[in-house]
Each structure stands twice: as C-alpha cells, then as structure tokens.
Amino acid sequence: MIQFYVCKLENQLAAVKEIWAWEPKESRFTLSAFPLILYLQDESGGLYTGDGSVDIKGQPVLKSNTGNWRACPFIFGFDCCERLAYYGIATNLVTYLTTKLHEGNVSAARIVTTWQGTCYLIPLIGAVLADAYWGRYWTIAAFSTIYVFGMCTLTLSATVPAFKPAECVESVCPSATTAQYAVFFSGLYLIALGTGGIKPCVIQFGADQFDDTDSKARVKKGSFFNWFYLFSNIGALVSSSLIVWIQDNAGWGLGFGIPALFMAIAIASFFSGTLLYRFQKPGGSPLTRVCQVLVASFRKSNSVVPADSNLLFETPDKTSVIVGSRKLEHTDELKCFDKAAVISDAENETGDFSNPWRLCTVTQVEELKILIRMFPILATGIVFSAVYAQMSTLFVEQGRMMDRTIGSFSVPAASLSTFDVISVIFWVPVYDRVLVPIARKFTGKGRGFSELQRMGVGLFISTLCMSAAALLEMKRLSIAKSQGLVHEDVPVPLSILWQIPQYFLLGAGEVFTFIGQHEFFYNQSPDAMRSLCSALSLLTNSLGNYLSSFILTVVTSITTKGGKAGWIPDNLNEGHLDYFFWLLAGLSFVNMVVYIFCAKMYKSKKSA
C-alpha cells in the first residue's frame, strides 16, 4: 500500500513537471508537500482524472472541464449520423443492384453480404491501429475521412450519366461497363474501409470520457452504453424509413447524397468536441504480445512446466507490466503455452528477464488463453449473423414480390427493416426494466441473466425468426400457384405487412445476442485487449455475411443443375425461397445446441 502511494505521488510530480516545467529544489517544498496536496485533491473528487487520461496535447486533464456527459453529445451526434449514413447505403443496396445495375437476385444478395462482411472484418485493422499506434481519436478521424470520400464516390456513380448503366428497354437491360463497375465498387469499398475502421473505436472512445477510478463516473458509464445504443438505432430508423423512400421515389443520386451529407455532419460533430475529450494513450499492440507468447513457448518447447505455478515468471509488483491491465491468475488449461513463462537456467544465471520474445509473464500467457477460450463462443455467433444478413437481402427480395400498397401509398420493401429497429427500441427497456428484475429473483444475479444465457436466448429467437420467414414464403407461393402467377414476375396479392413478425423477432434476437456479445467480450477480455476483443465481436458479423454468401453460392449451384430454376431464381414465384429459409432455421437450431455445449464448458477469466 505504501508503494502504491509513493507511485501515485511520483506520478503527480511528473505531471507538475510536465505542465509547468517545474523542477524541485532542495527545499521543504518537495515530494512530501506539493504533490501530496494534488493527490489529496484528486482522491477527494478534485483536480485530475485518475485513469491516466490526457487532453489533445497529451497533458493531464482536469475533471471539471473535460469528459463526462459534457463530451457525449458530440459522440452521440457522430454515431447517429454515421449509422444513418451506413444504413442509408446498406438497407436498400440490394434494390439498387437489381434495378439499376441489373444484377440478378442471387448476385445482388451475394454482393451485399460480401460487402457487409468486409465492413465487419476491417475493424480488426482499426482496433490494432488504435491500441498500438494512433489512439482511438486519430483512428476515428482518419477512417472517417476515408468514409466521406467513399460516400461521395458512390453518390457520383448514381448521379453522373457516364457512371450509370443505361436504363432497361422493355425486357432488355444492358450490363454496366467495366468503368461503371469500377467507380461503384470503389465507392462501396471505401465506405467499408471507413466504417470498419471506426467501428471498434467509437463506443470505447465514448466510455473513455468517464474516469474508471471514480465510482460515480462508473455508474454514468453504464448509462452511457444504453444511450449510445439508442442514438445508433435512431440513425438506423431514419435510414430504413425516410432515406429508403427517397431512394425509391426521388432518385438514387439524392438517396445516396443525403447519407454522404450526414457523414460530413458526423465528422463536424466529432471534431467539435475535441477540447472536451479525454484521451487514452496507446498501450502497445495486443497482437505483438500474442506473437511473443507463441514464439517464446515454441523456443522453450523442450522445457518442463513446473507443477507449482508460482515458479512461472511474473513481475513482483501488484500491477502488470502491460499498460492498462491488471494481473491475471494462472489457469491449468492449455499448459503448452505456460512454457513461455518458464524461467530457464540461463535466465536465472544472468538475471536477464527483459526479452519478451523469450520469456513472458503469466498475465501475458493468460491473455492468449482467454482469447482461445473465447473462440468457440465467437464461432457460434456466426450463424446468427448469417440470419441477420437476410434482413438487407432476401427479406427485401421477398417483400418486393408481395403487395406493397397501403391505401394510396406504396411501401418500399426495404422500409420493413424499420420494424427491426422498432423492435430493438421496444425490447431494450423491456429487457432492462421487466425481464432482468424477474430473472434476478430466480437466478440471484445482479444482471438477471449472465452474458452467456442472454446470447443463448437470442440464438433460440433466431430459429423462430427464420421459421416465420419460411412459413410466410410458403403462404406466398401457395397464393402465386392458386392464382396462376408462378411464371409471372409480379407481386402476389399478399400484404407486405405480414413480414412484420420476422423483422420483430429478428430485432428481439439482436437485443439478446448482439448486446450480449458486446457485454461478454468487454467483461471477459483482458484489460489491455478490449479494443481487439470488440473487433472480434464484430468479426462474427463479417463471417456471418461471408457464410450467407457461401450458402447462397452452394445452394444456387446445386439447385440449378439440369436447367432447373433453383431455389432463388430471378422470378421468386418460380423458386422455393422457403426451402432456403428452412435451411437457415435448421442451421440456427443446430448452432444453438452447439452453443449450449460450448457455454457449459466455458470458464470465466479471473483477475488477480
């Protein structure tokens, strides 16, 4: 305890020296006086934050005029506008591909899911850059700039005549030229790079505004996550309703241009709060530490791990050598990696323990073990993400073949995703205010459900969602058959509003699974790997979209043999989209069973 206070006082002295270039003289006003005053002020809710945060210039920050709720409106505004921009493209992209670029249903769905998969794969790059080199603020700034360039390029591809394919003449639809494809896909994948780079950083940067050493600030941080998710869904709600209507009725140039404008507004909002923000310095690459454990354990592959784990290498201090991380207790699983922490005779003789590529601490080894234990849980989220990908692809194509008129108003098929957002907005408070208190009485847990239980419920709901979509498609096909519309590429007289249950179930599954994933990866990840683990949780979205593309490709290849129309032809009245939905429902059920097994086997992390 005395050592902790001395370290605290020395840190305060260093801060004073840095701000005022003050050097202590040989007088009574030294380490025992002035820094002690600062220390007491800080601990009593005074001057400076205690979590190591700094301002834009790298100087210690005052609690009174930085961070906290005063910085959050700029971050909320940024995220709301960014989500509006992203979903303004993603929600109705399959319609643009089929009606303007003249792609077939399968090709359009595959393009969308591959692009969305890339959007959720790139966060790994953003996380590493933020953790190791740039910090979250500059990572957001850099990738947001790329984002705007991508939005503007995509808008040009839908506005400039030379960049747009010619319109269909009766049933003849000319294909886009190579140059037109180049402009379109350049814009699309610049957007993927931009949104992917900022995804793992924004919510964490917002959480950085609350001092983790202050008990009151920790409570506020919990509320921050709720408000952040709310503003994200407000942006998505505007896109899935107003922006989609503009695209279908006022033109794609305007429909893409408005999201581009809002992305520019997002950047302005973000930079406007710069002087109020608190910044965390980069703490080193988590991937480097993982590689060090792998290399060190390989080099010592012939070493014998001692039976007593206390003989493995660990620093004697209470704090870890890894910046921003607590020590982790040794676990008995995956002992092959413990060899990285075995102290060799040569190291004992020389007393040199400074090369992390030869000798790693127990905490560093346990970081890798935690990542490996997380992977089965990570993998079971992929199928749910494949189900979620149908909302912006096959659900839209199904809706376009239904009656979209309500009175004199024609409902864009992509606008039905509004009910997914409404479902999320409905289920978040219901879960927090109703389900958690009820569950708490039975489980005795403060949160009601554990993160693993919460995700399991979401996986079950995803099975119900795909079953509802399959049953609706069976009904739609039966009407098409009874009215002689099988060979007619026209909508059947069945209201599109019958899609609401599948969208509402998907939103409920999202609240349980996606938010549960964020909680799980935040709470179970090592302290210094939270950005990376946040990116890993987003990776399930990427792999889910790639899985959807892969299943579409395989199903189309198999079902179109012998000149057959296949399950998902361009005229869905001739196909069997219901079979595809039943396939996903079956995969979801099997995935849920595998998940239950993995969840029972999972062992939570233990900080020392």
Image (cartoon, rainbow, N blue to C red):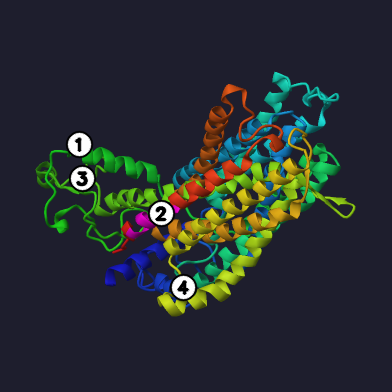
Front position among marks 4 and 3: 4
Taking 525 as reference, is 115 left or right? right
Quadrant in the rendering for residue 446: bottom left
Could you classify mark 2 by the number of other residues whose Cα lies within 10 Å: few (under 14), some (14-19), or many (20 or more)? some
Task: Look at the image and tell me whether residue 51 can be seen.
Answer: yes
* Discs 1, 2 touching: Cβ within 8 Å: no
**Which residue is disc 3 drawn over?**
336
Name which of mark 1 and mark 2 comes first in the sequence. 1
**Which residue is disc 2 drawn over?**
593
Name which of mark 4 and mark 2 comes first in the sequence. 4
At 78% from the left edge and 32% from the top edge, which residue is drawn?
158
- Between the residue at mark 4 and the residue at mark 2, the CA separation in whole angstroms equals 22 Å
**Which residue is disc 1 drawn over?**
299
Q: Residue 557 at what x, y percent from top left?
A: 55, 27
Q: Which residues are magenta?
A: 592-600
Taking 324 as reference, is 389 left or right? right
Q: Amino acid at mark 3?
A: Cys
**Which residue is disc 4 drawn over?**
448
- Between the residue at mark 1 and the residue at mark 3, the CA separation in whole angstroms equals 12 Å
User: Against 539, is 575 above or below?
Assistant: above
Q: Amino acid at mark 1?
A: Arg
